[in-house]
Image: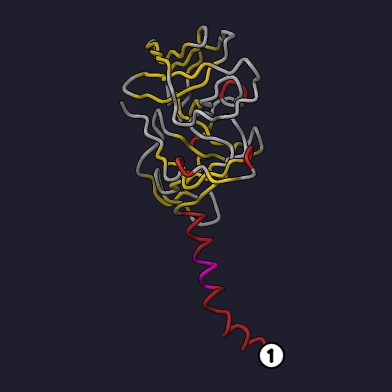
Amino acid sequence: MDKTIKLYKEWRFFIFLLLLMSVFRSAVADWYTVPTASMKPSILEGDRIFVNKMAYGLRVPFTTIPVAKWSAPERGDVVVFESAVADKRLVKRVIGIAVDTVQIVANQLIVNGQQAEYQTSAPDSAAINWGNGNNPPLLLNERLAGLQHEVALSHTRSFFGPVTVPENHLFVLGDNRDNSADSRFIGFVPINEVLGKAKGVIVSLNPDSYYLPRKARYFKAFDSDI
């Protein structure tokens, strides 16, 4: 017993520190490594992204029980959520909020009847490995309703919808439109599944190059405003 008390006294600071860090990561902010290509070119495999878990409200640590809510996800936000349908944690971009009508016609995004505009893009991540051989996707800047971000579109025209987003749900898409399991496949995302808003890349390690750092991507923010 005396030995246990002695060990506790010696390690109590580190135990408290670990507990504090766990509470912080559960309720305030966290960082996640992105293992897939669904958000290219905005997010690459090996990016470690910073997520603000208090962006929309506060929850009881280690639970999904809300304590307070002060905002809701908006179009253009990059959100991290625990998908019950996909049974995994996902990161996608919010395209439609409650009562929005979303449609894709020949690769062109249409929200509430307004068509997105596209321009050829040359992202700073020009060394992206797309794994498409001699047929990489088109890299375009998508502009819609005062928002813009880069997307990757295939040369094959795709169609979807129209669908209307129900209350307390979101319609999300991956920026890599033809390599993303998003609302076209898993359906609308309940807002209560959203863990937080991804603000940007903290650090990035390149899995195609022995996990060497991509220093140009350090502290790269996700900015979707025009």
Magenta portion: prevailing SS class = helix
Question: In the image, residue 195 lies at what x, y percent?
Answer: 50, 44
Relative placement, left or right, of 55 versus 136 is left
Which residue is pictured at 47% across the width and 59% down the height?
A: 24
- The local crowd at label 1, few if under 14, some if 14 to 19, many if 20 or more residues have their Cα within 10 Å, is few
Which residue is pictured at 43% across the width and 13% down the height?
A: 110
Q: Is residue 127 above or below residue 212?
A: above
Which residue is pictured at 50% across the width and 51% down the height?
A: 30
Circle 1 sits in a helix, a strand or a loop, which is it?
loop
- Decide which of 5, 65 is in the foreground and name it: 5
Q: Is residue 29 above or below residue 109?
A: below
Which residue is pictured at 39% across the width and 49% down the height?
A: 68
Q: Which residues are magenta?
A: 16-20
Q: Quadrant of the C terminus?
A: top left
Q: Which residue is mark 1?
A: 1
What residue type is disc 1 on? Met
Relative placement, left or right, of 221 versus 107 is left
Question: In the image, residue 207 lies at what x, y percent?
Answer: 63, 40
Does the magenta-highlighted stretch encompass residue 7? no
Question: In the image, residue 154 lies at what x, y percent?
Answer: 57, 14
